[in-house]
Amino acid sequence: MKKKVLIVDDSQTTRMTIDRMLGEEFEKKQASNGAEALEILRQDQSYSLIIMDINMPELNGMEFIKIQSETENIKNIPTMMCTTEASRPMKEKAKQYGVVKAWVIKPIIKELFVKAVKHVIK
Amino acid sequence: METKDTSIANKIIFIIVFSSLIVAVIGTSISLNRDFEKYKKDIQTRFLDIEKSLLPPLSSALYSEDTGQIKNGINGILKMPDIVYVEIRNPDEEEIAYKNGKPQEENSIHKEIKVEYLEPGADEEDKEHIADLKITASLEGATRKIKEQIIVFALIQGSQFLIITILIFYIFTRMVSRPLAIMATYAENLDLDDLSSGNLDLGRKNSNKRDELDKVVGSFNKMKDNLKISHEKLKDYAENLEEKVKMATREIEEEKNKVGNLLNNMKQAIFSVDGKGHIIPPVSDYASEVFGENIINKNIYDILYRDVDPKSELYANINTVFALIFGEDIIQFEIAEYYLPERMLVVDQKTGDRRALKVSNAPLWDEDELLTHLMYVIEDVTEKEKLELEIEEKKKSNEKNISIITEMANSDLEEVRFFLNNAAKLVEDSMSLAKMVPKEKMVLEEIFRALHTLKGNARVFKFDSISSLTHLTEDKVTTIKNKIEDGEEFIPTRTTYNPIIDDLYSLNQEVNEYSSLAKKVFRIENEFEKRVMNDVENYITDIDNIIDQRIISQSVFFKSKESKKEKRKFFDEIVNNPPSKDTIQDLHRVTHSLKGALRSHSSLKDLSEYAHMFEQSIDGIDQMKSEDIDDFTANFVEAIFELKSSLGPFFTRKESNRYTSIFLEEWIAVFEIIYNLTLNYDEKKEEITPQFSESVDSLFREAERLNCALIVKMCRDMKNFIKKPKPYIWKIIPTIVSDLWTFMALLSKMEFSKHSVDEDLNRIYNNFKSAEEIFEESKVKAEQILYTEISKHQGFLILGLLSNLQRKKLPLADFFVVAKKWVRTGGKLVDAFIYPPNTTVGSHHIVGAFANADFSKGLPDKFKELINNGDPIAESLLYFFQEDSFYTYLKLIDVSQLVDSFYLLQEDGEDQVIKVRTWPVVLKNLDKLEELAEKCGDDSIRRAVKKLKDIPVVPALSKFKSMVNEIADRLSKDVEFNIQGTNVTMDKDSFNTLQDAIVHILRNSLDHGIEDPSDRKKAGKKSEGNIFLSCEEREDDFINLVIKDDGKGINPEIISKKAIEKGIYTEDQISKLSEKEIIEIIFQPSFSQKESVDELSGRGIGMDVVKKNIESLQGTIEIKSKVGEGTEFILNFKSNKVG
């Protein structure tokens, strides 16, 4: 049974890129913002990993992880932040929510990314 | 808790007394009880006694009722001890019949006895019960006795208690308490500040046996002593604390320095930063050098990243990494690390120089394996990058060289030589014309013509950089020419011509570069310049040698120009030991010749100034009077240094154009001659044998063949010495022999250094080494080893020599004897001749050293540096350039050439290298073969060999493709050029002749045949024109070659008109000619020559040449042309001139 990964990013190109990088090893689903991601997670909580962009319309990555951390049945799904820029306060905040397991910097380097994904899922 | 003082003695006494009392009481009670029981038993016994002894009389008395007797009996009983009461009763009556004594109920024992009477003689059964006797025995006696005993016991116990108490108390006080008290007092009074007081003494009698107390005291005293010692130590320590702290600090500092030195030696800035980017000590010393300031406690953003634009992506990345990694695990670090820059450019704040830094990062973890600090290791790679860039550029130019060489190899070398000589002349002619700032159209046309010829030729050889440069220059010339034609008011000035002159200089340089390569690889040389260059080198070497050998005892070459000390030394030496007239004359003569040679060489003219200055300083010495000897000498020394430092760099320039052979077999031959020469040389006798002089001659010839300037010059000098021996030569000749050997060793080592098969190198190295080790003990063994090695591999200089020696049946082991004597080396020969296997240091160091070094002073230092870096070649170089040897300039020339050849030329494209290396060999062999065939006289063989050298026509003609394309481009025409043909060959000379013809026909077609694309469209043709060349061999040794275009064709009317205009024919004459004949007018010299050069490729130039050339090939040329459809040139000619 393949592990499920939810890819959340408002850029379709990025979603496609990540999707391709992850290859056939995972079952992947995409969402274009945090709200969409929450909707998907409301129906299915069996995801092994959420890959989350930060800057997105409607519900951004930081808002998402806050909600995620407060929602019982999804707060244990590990989340990987995927961002071009991260600041210290942002990271501290994310640490408080406790759902973020790793940060990946864009532009994504395949080897590093896959390594991080495998590490977090394990 | 409150405590009361109490005596241990009391406690002990109490315990002893109490316990002994209990024991005594229990014991006594048991004993008393037993006594009491015994008493009772005694009484019972008494009762029995009474029964036995007193009862019978009593019973008889009772029987007889004798009262007196009864009373006697009773009293008798009563008299018994303890019996206090007796009574007798009748058995049938209750009343007491008799009684006596006092009845006692308590503390007594009662006994009732049946009194029976048996009549004498009656049966036992007839006993008659006559009375009951009751006896009471009192126990008071026993009680009394016991009481007495208790009293005694109490008395004994009491006194015992008393005695024990006193005894214990005494003993204890005396033996334990007192000493303890003394000890306590002593301890209490012990002054820790002053432990020098006497030891603890209990004041007891000395005894040999030590009891526990003694031991305690001993321990105590020991403890006190120890305490005293440590106290003293402590005191001492306290007193010297400051000193010790200082010492420790110093030690720590030293340690730190050691680490610092280590870091410093590493030439790396090493430090770590915390999450906020603060740089935390320790920081390696080198860091402040890299950043130009002390960086401790500064922020990394203000140091390493200070020149990063805060708006840049890089800056954002660095920020992001810093935000993410701290307090995280290794995975997070690995993900983020990638985004930190690995190379930074930092501007030095003081000098403004840019430093290139190689940055690597490493994480530092806390105990939870979370990142706390980020370590930076920074290396200044500015110099390294510069060097790499230089090597890269050298390589690039080399790549270009390879392609040029390939082109040359594909062309006829004779032609290339002709082209290059011609090209140099053309450029020089154009240059001198341009420098005259000509105003006449005529002169410009001449320049144009020269350039045009050059361009055309360059295209044929595909020397693209020459043709494109020429093209640019041509354009500039045309522009000026047009201006002159257009307007009267335009007067060209020097400024007008400057760009052209600049171009011509670069063109000259470019041609030189080609020439230099041609020389290097194919030995194609410009004879004149070659001669001049040789002369220059020789003169400089002569000057150098005269100074080193005869004026100053040590080579000036490696001394810095700035060193006042050295100058002073030389000055003193010259003043104390002035050069002889002879020497000065020699020096003067050579310097003058040098000046002349420099002046006659186009690219060395500027240097003649220095020679001139030097010459003047010699004049001075020559005529000096004793009073101004100092002035002149000082001038002379100054001039020597000036000359050296100005001529030094000249030898490293590319244009010095030296070529020294890299062909192994030639070097082996040289080595063998050197070997023989050495065998013929006896340094102890100051004379020259004919054999030696013969060896010098043959070495000279071989070295000339090899083009090794150094050996040539050495031989030339030795020949001069032989002719006119002078005393100083006996110092010089051994140095030369030693130089030759050291040179061979260096060459051999360089050769091995390129060898990539490790096993070979390993084996050769080890075999050579063991042969060297044993040759003195066992020549035979050493030779066996060498034989084995030669049989395995001969492809190296040293093995080649040994194998030649073996072939001549010369003892191989002697090689070691000779070599040991003459090779300058630091240790074993094996390390002088053979590159140590498994060396990791790359050859680029040597290349770099030669590329970078300032030859007038920096080279030895560079070598030393390389030696320190473990470069094995550098050591050999240092020995080769040893200070007390001569010929430094020529050594430099040859070695830097060899370094180039060994390490650069051959590093690129192995195929090309093989081609470049084998091509001349192939040609040489063909020449030899031809020679042999010529000698053997068999015509068929001769022809077959000749055929070998033939040129395949079709592939050779394909070089015209690029020429056609380029010309078409320039003319803005679209042309497709196709060549087709069978396997046709021609001899070289014939082909050259043909080639010139073809060039002209093709040019003609391009210029006049093929129309502009627009015209072609108007004419209903495809915009792209076609030129088609086909070539096939006929059966009769003739070749049929057709060049056909689909251009506008040759219009006979125009030809006629022009011919009449030019006055070649009259109208009348023309009218009688056929169309074909009219067309053929173009082959007439007067027709084409009259054409001016005002059109790009020179209309009609050389159609007469075409005809002449083809005729010289016993051939014919025919033109078929149809106006509007195209022209066809049909050539029939013989493939071999000689047949």
Image: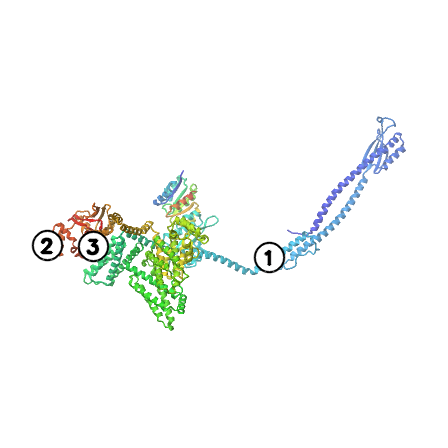
Residues behind callouts 2 and 3 on a single chain: yes
Q: Nearer the viewer, residue B232 or B1019?
A: B1019
Structural crowding at the residue carrying mark 2, measured as other residues with C-alpha within 10 Å and reported as few (<14), some (14–19) or many (≥20) = some
Identify residue for label 1: B230
Given this view, does label 3 or label 1 mark the residue nearer the observer? 3
Identify residue for label 3: B1097
Q: Is residue B355 visible?
A: no
Name the chain letter of the residue that bears numbered label 3.
B
**Which image quadrant is residue B121 in?**
top right
| Mark found first going from the N terminus, 2 or 3 | 2
Q: Position of residue B127 (x, y in %)?
A: 85, 27
Q: Position of residue B441 (x, y in %)?
A: 20, 61
Residues behind callouts 1 and 2 on a single chain: yes
Identify residue for label 2: B1067
How far is disc 3 from disc 1 in space, using C-alphas? Answer: 110 Å
Q: Nearer the viewer, residue B906 or B765?
A: B765
Dot 1 lies on which element?
helix
Structural crowding at the residue carrying mark 1, measured as other residues with C-alpha within 10 Å and reported as few (<14), some (14–19) or many (≥20) = few
